[in-house]
Image (cartoon, coloured by chain):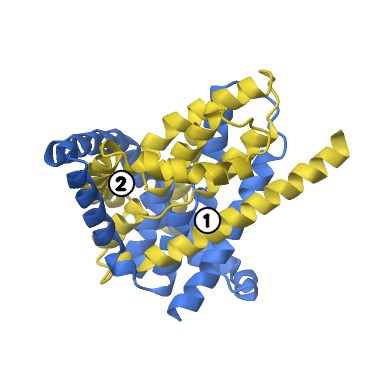
Amino acid sequence: MINYIWSFFILIGVFYSIYKGDANLSNTLLTSGKTAIDMIFSIGSIICLWLGIMNIAKKSGLLDILSNKLSPLVRLLFPEIPKGDPAIGYISLNIVMNMMGLGNAATPFGLKTMKELKRLNNNSDVASRSMITFLVINTASVTIIPTTVISLRVLNGSSNPNEIISSCIITTFLSVVLALIIDRLFYYLWRKRYV
Amino acid sequence: MSNYLVPIMVVFIIIYGLYKKIDIFDTFIEGVKEGINVTFKLFPTIFAMVIAITILTNSNILLDIGKLLNPLFKFLSFPSEVLPLALMKPVSGSSSIVILNDILSRYHPDSYIGRISSVIGGSTDTTIYIISLYFGSIGIKKIKYSLVVGLIADLLCIIISIIVINILFY
């Protein structure tokens, strides 16, 4: 899909510029790479800072404590997972990593979770209720510190790059709650129709 | 509260690390090394997307389409400048980073549009990418209602972020 999006953007952009008679077209093409360099330095410095700090949180066991605290809530959200199943632990760790803005560290736990959920679903190739709930939590992404966004705000000269953190937390929290409600709703509607 | 959240978290994590007697400095450096790797891995994708998106946005086609649809957006009181971000966010993470950067450089991060796009950028994830990665990894063929729920959640997130920004800042 990304193949088509990428080519489509360039083709449409070039054709529309030519159609509008834009004289700067070749200049745009040749200099746009500089924006990428600026961006990567800006994002990179914050990623490095955050991964450094979070590595301390990981090594000192702080993230494990957080994920233990989270597991009762996880059990509530995933009633189909039996008590004491390792899947609960993986799900909690995935959510904690995502919350702390560690997307890269969250993905391995996410993949592991999916494997466990498939085992619990008798290795069927149909998505289970728990899998969908898990994906909904992941795509709604409960983030406490949106590191990339903050770095882009710094890059573009915001006078207060951090001012959106509380708005992000409120938005992300409300949308994950709503998403879970919709998930439940669809689960019952689907079951009524197909089972 | 927003201003001190990050420093307070950092201080707390460092104090807890000292209390647990771990090698704080080396652990931090280790994380930074991982950060460099992540950044370098991200660069080629960002570079490719920057070129495509700069060409697209500089052709002004998105603005022209936005103008065309303006009456509809006015009616919904949705800022049409945010539309490209809202459309790309569920599909591709790196291209929405680039689009967000484009919006922030055009309208300034502290403007109404800048704040709304920041919150959208910070509080949803790439639904289609995650669904295809996670289901693909374990060979799920029937994904049932997952995509529908994911996309409705994205839409709700955009609506909520506009409401929250309006309440907190204006």
Q: Residue at x 86, y 34 (%)?
A: A194
**Front-most of residues B105 and A99:** A99
**Front label number (1 vs 2):** 1
Q: Callout 2 environment at 10 Å: few (<14), some (14 to 19), or many (20+)? A: some
Task: Point out which mark residue B86 bears.
Answer: 1
| Image mark 1: chain | B
Task: Point out which mark residue A29 bears.
Answer: 2
Check the rendered structure and report the hue given to chain A. Answer: yellow
Return the x and y of residue A101 as percentages of the image width and height. Answer: 37, 47
Compared to A101, does B8 lie above or below? below
Q: Residue at x 34, y 72 (%)?
A: B110
Name the element at disc 1.
Answer: helix
**Quick one: which chain is blue?**
B
> Would you say the residues marked 1 and 2 are in contact, meaning their CB atoms lie under 8 Å apart?
no
* Residue ranking furthest to the left: B25
**Left or right: residue A54 compared with residue A17:** left
Compared to B68, does B12 lie above or below? above
